[in-house]
Image (spheres, rainbow, N blue to C red):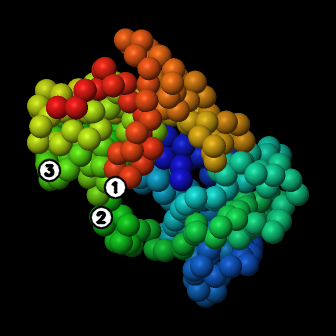
């Protein structure tokens, strides 16, 4: 599943392409991928103009001038592919990004009045595109429970520490991955930020000093921002809004670098299990408390 930097990269790319476009038609082949009534689609999507694209956690929100929004979750194998004067693709890197569309994985096609199209492809059918009144978007279950955005200017170290301490007896990596604590952080950036802060992923939150948690806050924001600048990671199932693999993984310090030397101390990086996930650490720099 794409993490926060990958979805932000998609938002940035599509914002340059589809804002101001008018929807002329919509097609879908799978009700769970497009769970919207035909009357709502006719009234609030057909003929609507795209005004803005936002991101909340790992979800895209496309605002329309009808006071409605399209909420898009790519899940595991979702793609967004734009075809017009420019061709862009984002998501799971199979041939649908470059082949003729629609194809057998296409679940939703949005036609624009200028002849361009936006395709939502999803092989495993876990993703979805929902149409809702914009005022109701914050009220869907996911958004009501998701934590604050880690890159928001008002997400202070104090707020970060308070939220982590809600699960003070849990391992710190598990807490970082908890979307109700902090939004959008996945496996790659949890590993990278914990390495940067010299914290073992299995350390209990209560055993970490506030000074160390403040350092973790800084490092988490730094690795997320760097990844956005690099166009996301080159994780096995992700490409960015231009159909190119992101370059962040070239700058990763520990993730997928097992058996290689730690860039800080030279100790061999190892892969272990933490929070139910494959986890990469330096056993010297990240000693367990």
- Residue 245 at what x, y percent from top left? 67, 36
Among the two numbered marks 1 and 2 on one chain, the one whose residue lies closer to the N terminus: 2
Asked if residue 214 is positioned above or below residue 47 in the image, the reply reads above
Among the two numbered marks 1 and 3 on one chain, the one whose residue lies closer to the N terminus: 3
Mark 1 → mark 2, Cα distance in angstroms: 8 Å
- Residue 34 at what x, y percent from top left? 61, 76
Asked if residue 101 is positioned above or below residue 227 in the image, the reply reads below
- Residue 65 at what x, y percent from top left? 55, 65
Q: Nearer the viewer, mark 1 or mark 3?
A: 3
Q: Quadrant of the rendered structure where residue 88 is? A: top right
Contact, CB < 8 Å: mark 3 with mark 2?
no
Contact, CB < 8 Å: mark 1 with mark 2?
yes
Q: Nearer the viewer, mark 3 or mark 2?
A: 3
Name the residue at the top extreme: 265
Mark 1 → mark 3, Cα distance in angstroms: 17 Å
| Crowd around label 1: few <14 · some 14–19 · many ≥20 (10 Å) | some
In the rendered view, does 271 fall on the left or right side of 118? left
In the rendered view, does 276 fall on the left or right side of 91? left
Residue under numbered circle 2: 145
Among the two numbered marks 3 and 2 on one chain, the one whose residue lies closer to the N terminus: 2
SS of the residue at dot 1? loop
**Residue placed most toward the observer, 279 or 166:** 279
**Label drawn at residue 169:** 3
Q: Quadrant of the rendered structure where residue 203 is? A: top left
Q: Nearer the viewer, mark 1 or mark 2?
A: 1
Asked if residue 230 is positioned above or below residue 166 in the image, the reply reads above
Residue at left 46%, top 39%?
188
- Residue 252 at what x, y percent from top left? 49, 26
Residue under numbered circle 1: 179
Residue at left 11%, top 31%?
209
């Amino acid at each position: 599943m794409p993490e926060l930097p990958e979805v932000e990269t998609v938002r940035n790319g599509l914002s340059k392409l589809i804002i101001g476009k008018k929807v002329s038609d919509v097609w879908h082949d799978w009700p769970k991928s497009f769970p919207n009534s035909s009357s709502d689609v006719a009234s609030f999507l057909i003929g609507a103009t795209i005004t803005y694209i936002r991101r909340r956690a790992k979800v895209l929100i496309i605002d329309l001038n009808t006071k409605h929004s399209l909420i898009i979750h790519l899940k595991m194998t979702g793609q967004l592919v734009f075809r017009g004067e420019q061709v862009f693709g984002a998501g799971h890197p199979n041939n649908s990004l470059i082949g003729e569309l629609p194809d057998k994985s296409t679940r939703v096609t949005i036609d624009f009045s200028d002849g361009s199209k936006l395709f939502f492809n999803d092989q495993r059918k876990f993703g979805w595109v929902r149409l809702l009144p914009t005022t109701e978007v914050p009220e869907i279950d996911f958004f009501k429970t998701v934590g604050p955005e880690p890159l928001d200017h008002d997400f202070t170290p104090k707020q970060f520490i308070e939220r982590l301490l809600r699960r003070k007896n849990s391992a710190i990596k598990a807490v970082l991955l908890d979307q109700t604590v902090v939004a959008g952080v996945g496996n790659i950036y949890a590993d990278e930020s914990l390495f940067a802060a010299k914290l073992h992923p299995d350390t209990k939150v209560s055993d970490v000093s506030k000074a160390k948690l403040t350092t973790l806050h800084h490092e988490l924001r730094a690795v997320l921002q760097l990844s956005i600048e690099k166009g996301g990671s080159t994780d096995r199932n992700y490409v960015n809004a231009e159909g190119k693999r992101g370059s962040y993984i070239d700058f990763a310090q520990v993730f997928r670098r097992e058996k290689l030397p730690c860039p800080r101390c030279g100790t061999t990086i190892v892969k272990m299990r933490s929070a139910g996930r494959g986890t990469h650490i330096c056993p010297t720099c990240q000693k367990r408390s």
